[in-house]
Amino acid sequence: MDGRIKLEYLDRIKSIDQANKTQATRCIRDIFDRYMSINKHLLASQFWNKMEAKQHVSDCQILLELMEYLDSKRKQQLSRLVCVSIEYCLTNRCKIYDFDNYLLKVIRRFINMEKDMSVMFCIFCMLDYCHNDIQDTYYLNIVKAGLSGALLEYYIDLLGKVTNQNKESVLDVIRNLKAAGAQRVDLEEALKLVCICE
């Protein structure tokens, strides 16, 4: 996907009226399907490399702009691609201009608007690689999307069980969620699993 495609289709989206929306949607989905067919190998991180990562992330940003025209199946494909892009670029410390802005767009779109659990879990596992402002935005959007309890339960499942050794890390997640505005009622079910009373 190159700049020509971006300009052609983003301009078309901005200018279409409701009568043409069905046709534009079909066209955009066709573009998406062709892109995914050509690049399906990118759904596995072993096929990524630092030389091409910048272009792949740029493509993901374009696809994010077209997301409202995708159906649930295509959104799931994009979700997987986005997760791989984030995992690869953060763990390999790829230097990509405006990558933080890309992360913020993903957080707002997939977590706040789509309530996508796979993206929520993916970014949670990568938070240690992120700046504080990204972490803050992540927790704010988790709370806004009503996913505080789901995130905490996921983390507890990931740990297996809460022990004296990992209890503090669970409390850190609870503190971050509370700082972002989560109410105790949002965390109630997960707190029962933790069996901690602050």
Image: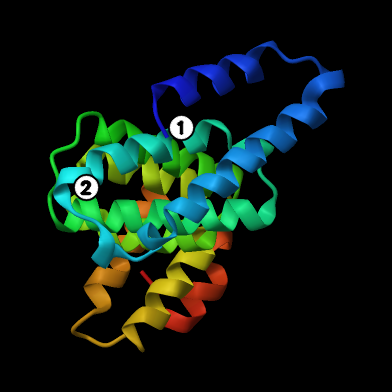
Q: CA distance from mark 2 to mark 1?
A: 22 Å
128 lies left or right of 11: left
Q: For this rendering, which residue is in front, 29 or 141?
A: 29
In the picture of the structure, the residue carrying the numbered disc 1 is 62
Res 27 seen here: yes
Please identify the residue farthest to the right as the structure is shown: 19
Q: Is residue 188 above or below residue 106?
A: below
Tell me where residue 135 appears, x and y as whole percent. Answer: 29, 46
Q: Quadrant of the N terminus?
A: top left
Q: Quadrant of residue 164?
A: bottom left
In the picture of the structure, the residue carrying the numbered disc 2 is 130
Q: Is residue 182 above or below residue 174?
A: above
Q: Is residue 111 above or below residue 184?
A: above
User: What residue lies at 49% left-to-right and 17% top-to-bottom?
Assistant: 7
Q: For this rendering, which residue is in front, 15 or 26?
A: 26
Give amino acid for label 2.
Cys
Task: Determine the secondary structure under disc 2.
Answer: loop
Tell me where residue 133 appears, x and y as whole percent. Answer: 26, 37
Please identify the residue farthest to the top as the structure is shown: 15
User: What residue lies at 79% left-to-right and 14% top-to-bottom?
Assistant: 17
Q: Disc number at residue 103?
A: none
Q: Quadrant of the C terminus?
A: bottom left
177 lies left or right of 26: left
User: What residue lies at 73% left-to-right and 15% top-to-bottom?
Assistant: 16
Give amino acid for label 1.
Ile
Q: Is residue 153 above or below residue 125?
A: below
- In primary-sequence order, the first of circles 2 and 1 is 1
Tell me where residue 79 appears, x and y as whole percent. Answer: 49, 54
70 lies left or right of 186: right
Tell me if mark 1 has few (under 14), some (14-19) or many (20+) residues whose alpha carbon lies within 10 angstroms of its own.
Answer: some
Res 196 seen here: no
